[in-house]
Image (cartoon, rainbow, N blue to C red):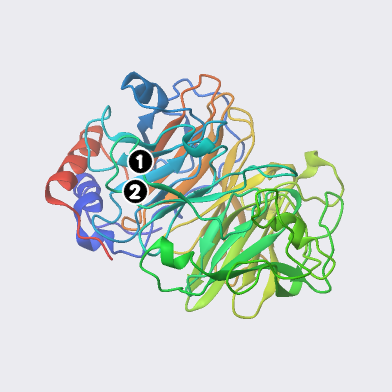
C-alpha cells in the first residue's frame, strides 16, 4: 500500500497545480483491487464507469449534447485522445477525432472551468471529406496527427493529416494538412520512438506494422518532417505468414522491408500505386519481394521506454487459436526497437489476477493501449458497454515486457456501464500522474462523453477550483 502524507483536499489541489506533483513519477492508479466481473448498465451516463478502487473518482468533462447546444460542428463517435505534450501551455489541451463518415477534430481546454465553453471543434465535420478519424498523436514538433481508419481497393481514404495550429485554432479554424508521403492504409495507432521514427498499422484482418523514417527526424515542423523519408513494413522471419483466428502467435526476429524509396517515392518493383498516384501501403506490403507479416486486425500502438529499453506494443483484435471467441480472443504484442525481436505480451492464456486462472473469455477484442507514469500498460477492449467492455491493467512487475513471472498477469481495472458504447482513447496525463481521461464512444443515447478519472479522491468543489486556479496562474510544464 502506498503512503500518502497530504490531506485529502491538499492532495487533490496539489495534484492539479503543484509543479512538484506534475513532475512526479509515481502513480496511484496501480493501487487497486481487481474487479471480478464486468459492469452492468449504469444508472447515470455522466458517471458510467465501475472503478476498481474506492479512491478513484470520475467526472464528465465534455459531452456531445453540450457541444451541439453550443452550435458546434460535432458528428460524434469521439475516438482516441492525446494532449499537447510539448510547447507553450503543454498539457493544457486534449485532442480527439470523430470516427464518423464526416470526421473532424475537437479540443478540450482543461483550464476552462466552464463546462459549456471548454470544448471547441477545430476541424469541422467533413473537412476535406475526412472520414473515420481514429488515430490521435501529438507530434514531437508540436503538431497534432490524426488519420482515417478506412482503406481498400479503389478508396480515396487511408490518409494521414496534421493540424498545424492545434492549440491556437479557433472554431473550425484548424489548418488541416494531408501528409501524403505515408502510404495509404486503414489507420489506427501511431507511435514515435526516441529517434522520432513514426510507427503505424493497417487495421485489417491480415494488416501489417509499418515504420516511417524521416530524412529530417529533428524537424521543428511537419512540412520538413514529412518532406522526405522512407517507409518500411515488418517481416517476421521469412515473412508471408498470416496470424488468422485459428493459429499461434507470431514471434521472433524480424526485419524492416522498404516499400518506398528514401524520399518516399516509388520503389521500383515493390511500390504499388493507388488510383490517385500515392502509394498503397497494403498492396505494397503484400508484394512478393516484401512478404510482410500479416496480423489479425492490428489496432493501437504504444511506446514504452524504461531505462533506455524501447518497446512498441500493439494489439491484434481478432487473433485467436481456435476461432472460438467465447474462450478469449485477441493478443497484445511488443517488439524491441533495438534488437528487432517480436514477443507475445498477453492473450487469453494470461493469468487473471482476480482468480489466479487464465483470463480466457474475459479478454476479448483488445483495441486501444495506454501507458501511465510508471510505464504500466493498460488494454482497452472494443466490446459492449453495460455488458462486457473493460479496461485491463497489465501487471509487469519487473518491466521485462512479459507477464510470465510470479505475481504477474492481467487485472480488470475499470468497466463501462453505458449501453451501446465502448471505451476508447484512455490517456494518462503526462504532467499529473494521478489523472487520466477516457472517451465513452457511440452510446445508444448518441451522447459521446469524455471522462476524467482521478487516482486520489477529489471533492466536487475542487474539480472546478483546480481547473480555475490552473487557468489563472498556469502550470509549470515540462517542455
Secondary element at image label 1: strand
Where residue 63 appears, as percent x and y from the top left, is 39, 28
Mark 1 packing: few (<14 Cα in 10 Å), some, or many (20+)?
Answer: many
Q: Is 344 rendered above or below residue 186?
A: below
Secondary element at image label 2: loop
Q: Kindly identify which residue carries mark 2.
A: 166
Q: Are marks 2 and 1 in contact (CB under 8 Å)?
A: yes
Q: Quadrant of residue 249?
A: bottom right
Residue at left offset 49%, top offset 32%? 126
Q: In this rendering, which labeled residue sits more in front, label 2 or label 1? A: 2
Figure disc tally:
2
Residue at left offset 27%, top offset 29%? 115
Query: Is 343 on the left or on the right of 420, as rendered?
Result: right
Where residue 135 appears, as percent x and y from the top left, is 53, 48
Q: Is 295 rendered above or below residue 77?
A: below
Residue at left offset 71%, top offset 59%? 208
Query: Is 409 on the left or on the right of 465, as rendered?
Result: right
Q: Nearer the viewer, residue 179 or 398?
A: 179
Q: Quadrant of residue 114?
A: top left
Q: Kindly identify which residue carries mark 1.
A: 107
Query: Is 479 on the left or on the right of 307, as rendered?
Result: left
Residue at left offset 54%, top offset 43%? 134
Q: Nearer the viewer, residue 142 or 364?
A: 142
Amino acid at each position: 500500500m502506498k503512503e500518502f502524507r497530504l490531506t485529502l483536499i491538499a492532495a487533490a489541489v496539489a495534484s492539479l497545480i503543484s509543479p512538484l506533483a506534475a513532475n512526479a513519477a509515481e502513480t496511484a492508479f496501480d493501487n487497486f483491487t481487481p474487479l471480478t466481473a464486468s459492469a452492468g448498465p449504469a444508472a447515470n451516463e455522466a458517471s458510467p464507469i465501475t472503478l476498481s478502487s474506492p479512491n478513484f473518482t470520475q467526472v464528465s468533462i465534455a459531452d456531445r449534447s453540450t457541444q451541439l447546444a453550443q452550435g458546434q460542428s460535432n458528428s460524434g463517435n469521439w475516438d482516441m485522445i492525446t494532449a499537447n505534450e510539448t510547447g507553450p501551455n503543454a498539457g493544457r489541451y486534449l485532442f480527439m477525432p470523430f470516427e464518423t463518415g464526416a470526421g473532424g477534430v475537437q479540443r478540450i481546454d482543461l483550464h476552462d472551468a466552464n463546462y459549456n465553453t471548454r470544448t471547441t471543434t477545430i476541424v469541422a465535420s467533413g473537412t476535406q471529406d475526412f472520414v473515420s478519424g481514429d488515430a490521435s498523436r501529438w507530434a514531437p514538433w508540436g503538431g497534432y496527427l490524426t488519420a482515417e481508419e478506412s482503406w481498400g481497393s479503389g478508396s480515396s481514404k487511408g490518409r494521414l493529416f496534421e493540424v498545424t495550429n492545434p492549440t491556437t485554432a479557433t472554431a473550425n479554424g484548424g489548418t488541416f494538412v494531408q501528409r501524403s508521403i505515408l502510404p495509404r492504409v486503414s489507420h489506427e495507432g501511431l507511435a514515435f520512438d526516441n529517434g522520432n521514427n513514426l510507427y503505424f498499422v493497417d487495421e485489417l484482418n491480415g494488416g501489417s506494422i509499418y515504420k516511417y523514417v524521416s530524412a529530417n527526424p529533428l524537424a521543428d515542423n511537419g512540412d520538413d518532417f514529412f518532406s522526405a523519408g522512407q517507409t518500411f513494413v515488418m517481416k517476421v522471419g521469412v515473412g508471408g505468414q498470416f496470424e488468422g483466428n485459428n493459429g499461434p502467435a507470431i514471434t521472433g526476429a524480424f526485419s524492416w522491408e522498404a516499400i518506398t524509396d528514401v524520399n518516399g517515392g516509388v520503389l521500383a518493383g515493390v511500390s504499388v500505386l493507388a488510383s490517385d498516384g500515392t502509394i498503397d501501403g497494403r498492396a505494397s506490403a503484400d508484394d512478393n519481394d516484401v512478404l510482410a507479416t500479416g496480423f489479425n486486425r492490428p489496432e493501437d500502438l504504444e511506446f514504452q521506454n524504461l531505462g533506455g529499453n524501447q518497446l512498441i506494443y500493439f494489439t491484434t483484435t481478432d487473433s485467436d487459436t481456435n476461432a472460438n471467441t467465447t474462450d478469449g480472443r485477441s493478443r497484445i504484442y511488443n517488439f524491441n526497437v533495438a534488437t528487432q525481436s517480436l514477443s507475445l505480451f498477453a492473450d487469453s492464456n494470461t493469468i487473471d489476477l482476480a482468480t489466479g486462472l487464465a483470463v480466457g473469455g474475459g479478454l476479448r477484442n483488445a483495441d486501444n493501449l495506454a501507458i501511465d507514469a510508471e510505464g504500466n500498460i493498460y488494454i482497452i477492449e472494443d466490446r459492449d458497454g453495460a455488458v462486457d467492455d473493460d479496461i485491463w491493467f497489465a501487471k509487469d512487475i519487473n518491466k521485462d515486457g512479459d507477464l510470465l513471472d510470479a505475481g504477474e498477469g492481467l487485472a480488470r481495472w475499470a468497466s463501462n456501464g453505458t449501453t451501446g458504447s465502448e471505451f476508447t482513447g484512455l490517456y494518462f496525463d503526462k504532467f499529473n500522474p494521478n489523472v487520466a481521461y477516457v472517451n465513452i464512444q457511440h452510446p445508444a443515447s448518441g451522447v459521446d462523453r469524455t471522462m476524467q478519472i482521478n487516482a486520489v479522491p477529489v471533492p466536487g468543489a475542487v474539480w472546478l477550483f483546480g481547473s480555475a486556479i490552473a487557468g489563472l496562474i498556469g502550470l509549470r510544464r515540462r517542455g
